[in-house]
Image (tube, rainbow, N blue to C red):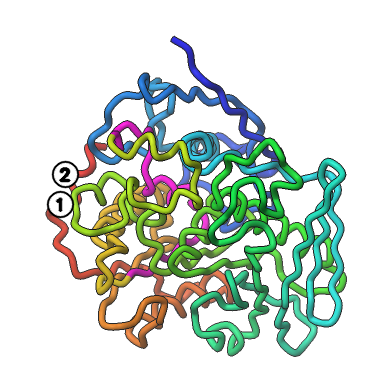
Amino acid sequence: MKRKVLRTFAMTMLTVFSMNLQVSAREIPLVYNTESSVTPFEVCLPSLKELPVIEKLPDPFAWSDGSGRSTLFEDWSRRRMEIGAEIQHYEIGEKPARPDSITADFSDDTLTVWINVNGEQLILKSHVIIPEGEGPFPAVIGIGRGSGSLPAELFSSRDIAQVTFNFAQVMAWQQKRGEEPINRLYSDLVHMGAYSAWSWGVSRLIDGLELVADKLPVDLQRLAITGCSFAGKMALFAAAFDERIALTIAQESGGGGAAAWRVSETLGEVETLGRTNFVWFMEKLSQFSDDVNKLPYDHHELMAMVAPRALLVLGNPDFEWLAEESGFISSKAAKRVWETFGIEDRFGFSIVADHGHCMLPDVQRPEVEAFIDKFLMGDKTANTIVEIHPYSEEKVASWMDW
């Protein structure tokens, strides 16, 4: 049986996952110092015809080759990279590795990053809001603006720096394949989806923050990312594929974000896999439009890739297209990963009605503040056990047999 193989590229992190101890006997990291914390390895990636039908949400702890499962934390780094390899292969395309040639500068409240690949250059420019004082300050990468779609005062009142990710500098919201800035650098990756390109861009922006650490006083151990709607999906993908992000707040990300493709198929007029915007994904993802149950993963596992770091998922059931019931079931499934490792306070979800799309209502603000206070400000007393939703939990068990 022929199988395609995707090699995942990452850097070894010597101080992580090196001790063969039970989870309860060690401190599980809140964040990492590298984009990826495991060495390269190969993952078997069957063709559509060879993939088995999986009607329920796939087991996030099961090895891709069918050899069993492991709930040991020391195995999680490898397992999450298997999930990442599957998502890249079937859904968004390969995220390019960090280029050898990157330079950066910070002046006039602007971070500039120059990325050179194959004789071509891409430039990222980000407006940065720095609090008064010496720092170093926690920071949030806001998609589209410094705080994303969240109120800026959530961060400014806490002396948290705000860094804008201007995603169009990498790829437009509605990409024209082969004509985007990133295509100049990687002409062989014309097929890539925007969520691979944008994730790459976020990682290069973080590289830039590292390179200007002597000028820009940002605490790189306390870095967050946030966005809403299509940018909520972007925040999820970026955090899943860069372990330097300590906190992710994914707001109203809908189908292709927190919602599980399988569950969404059973709902009404929602963003299913067949109805999504394929410029955001690889066009070949459409081969699963009538075979969603052949996906070897689902988006509870995209969320789980963020573990053991912190993730808060925000939802809005007033907008049917967002498939929030699917997001709820997917979140319940994803939470099992954090619970298994005894760090359930690092994952929460809040699905609240009666407000506009991408508008944070006052009733949802406390959980956002709690996650910011605990994971950016270091307040260990903040209550981040958050599970707010309007749905019955009867369906949840029917989607999981693990």
Occupied quadrant, residue 147:
bottom right
- Measured as percent of width and height from the top left, residue 126 is found at 72, 72
Packing grade of label 1 (10 A; few <14, some 14-19, many >=20) is few
Occupied quadrant, residue 109:
bottom right
**Can residue 28 be spotted in the picture?**
no
Q: Which residue is mark 1?
A: 395
Q: Secondary structure at mark 2?
A: helix
- Measured as percent of width and height from the top left, residue 292 is found at 30, 38
Q: Residue at x 41, y 45 (%)?
A: 301
- Measured as percent of width and height from the top left, residue 356 is found at 34, 81
Q: Nearer the viewer, residue 310 or 258?
A: 258
- Measured as percent of width and height from the top left, residue 138 is found at 66, 74
Q: Residue at x 76, y 65 (%)?
A: 209
Placement of 277 over or under 40, stated as above or below: below
Please identify the residue farthest to the top as the structure is shown: 1
Q: Amino acid at mark 1?
A: Lys
Q: Residue at x 43, y 27 (%)?
A: 64
Q: Which residue is mark 2?
A: 398
**Can residue 363 be spotted in the picture?**
yes
Q: Which residues are magenta?
A: 291-315
Packing grade of label 2 (10 A; few <14, some 14-19, many >=20) is few
Q: Residue at x 45, y 65 (%)?
A: 250
Left or right relative to 98: residue 84: left
Q: Quadrant of the N terminus?
A: top left
Q: Secondary structure at mark 1?
A: loop
Q: Nearer the viewer, residue 96 or 122?
A: 122
User: Marks 1 and 2, Cα distance to the nearest angstrom?
Assistant: 5 Å
Q: Is residue 295 magenta?
A: yes
Occupied quadrant, residue 224:
bottom right
Placement of 277 over or under 384, stated as above or below: above
Q: Amino acid at mark 2?
A: Ser
- Label pair 1/2, CB-CB below 8 angstroms: yes
